[in-house]
Image: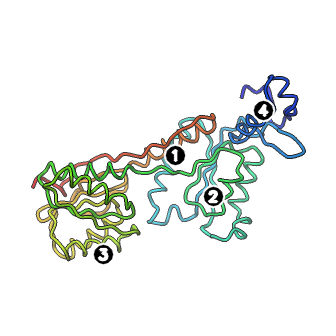
Amino acid sequence: MEGRLKPGARLPATTELSKMFNVNPDTVQQSLKQLADRGFVSRTPGRGTFIRKGISSRTLALIFKHSLFIDEEISFYSSYLNDLVVLGEKEHWNLRFFLVSENLNPEDASGEKGFVDLKKAINDGEVRAVVEFCSNPSVQDYLRNECPVPVSFSDVTVDMPGFLRRGLDYLRDRGYRKVAVLTAGYPELQAVLKSYRQQHGEMELSLYRSDKADHREGYQLIRQVYAKEAPEALLITNDRVFTGAWYYLLEKGIRVPQDLAVLTHTNKGREPMSHVPLTRLEIDPMDFAREIYHEITAKIEGRNYELRPVVASLVPGKSCGEK
């Protein structure tokens, strides 16, 4: 890191290093493995250990699929990616972009230009670390098992149990007792809802869950709600599910907030369309970007970093007033 060993320089043999530092050869081997995992050296059987060409590189590679900017199902990631670029540039990193398709065939992926270009840039020492966004399984397999530089797989999550409790607290404080929760994924929310119900016996809570997050599922979920009950309030944990639910409310002439309070999830900068200013629990893509930046920096420096779930911010609107 101080530049005394130049990129491409060959390190002494394990036995020689063992004598130099007066340690066991196994300790040297473990140390060299750690250096390789951090992207400082490359090891070639029969040839030796060499200082990587990219040791002083200030370039982050960002690899993602072509549809990132046009697929509404993953539109959040385009904001997330943009914020990571902003953070990287602020810290004087160069950013290189590599686009790949969504194919699942390893034979096709091996010749894919974005994938080939990424591996070449890594091998040529032009890239210090990689951040992966929604690429294909072949790319992910290479990055997990073969890539010689640090990698982040963008595994940041939302604190969904905290999201649910905060939303329920907000509704309860405003006098709402009969609440239907609409969600996509997150099967653990059933246990969170049960725990909340035990703590607040006056609350009538029901969960309607789909495995898929889109507006069609949201429409079907809200239909299920009104086939069984007429809630005082809706708490929706997904913006795509909200869209479908909102279509249904408009279709049936259910007024918000006069007939029904609505508290929904939104991503900052991508508020769902509605004629009523929404009360919402907002997720900021910049919070995701900060976590990824902290993680990849720690990996480069050889430190452990545990990704923290992102916490939602409550933004008051007019879709959820006092009961």
> Quadrant of residue 253 in the image?
bottom left
Which callout, 4 or 2, points at the residue further toward the start of the chain? Answer: 4
Asked if residue 41 lies left or right of residue 235, the reply is right
**Of circles 4 and 1, which is in front?**
4
* Residue labelled with disc 1: 84
Which callout, 4 or 1, points at the residue further toward the start of the chain? Answer: 4
Under mark 4, the amino acid is Val
Where is residue 190 shown, x and y percent of the image?
A: 31, 60
Mark 4–mark 3 contact, CB under 8 Å?
A: no
Q: CA distance from mark 3 to mark 2?
A: 34 Å
Q: Check the picture and name the quadrant holding the C terminus.
A: bottom left
Judge the density around disc 2: few (<14), some (14-19), many (≥20) Cα neighbours within 10 Å: some
Mark 3–mark 2 contact, CB under 8 Å?
A: no
Under mark 3, the amino acid is Gln
Q: Is residue 246 above or below residue 290?
A: below
Disc number placed over residue 140 in the picture, else none: 2
Q: CA distance from mark 4 to mark 3?
A: 60 Å
Dot 2 falls on a residue whose secondary structure is helix
**Of circles 1 and 2, which is in front?**
2
Under mark 1, the amino acid is Leu
Dot 1 falls on a residue whose secondary structure is helix
Residue at point 63%, 34% (across, down): 301
> Quadrant of residue 217 in the image?
bottom left
Which callout, 1 or 2, points at the residue further toward the start of the chain? Answer: 1
Q: CA distance from mark 4 to mark 2?
A: 30 Å
Total numbered badges shown on the rendered structure: 4
Which callout, 4 or 3, points at the residue further toward the start of the chain? Answer: 4
Q: CA distance from mark 4 to mark 1?
A: 36 Å
**Of circles 4 and 2, which is in front?**
4
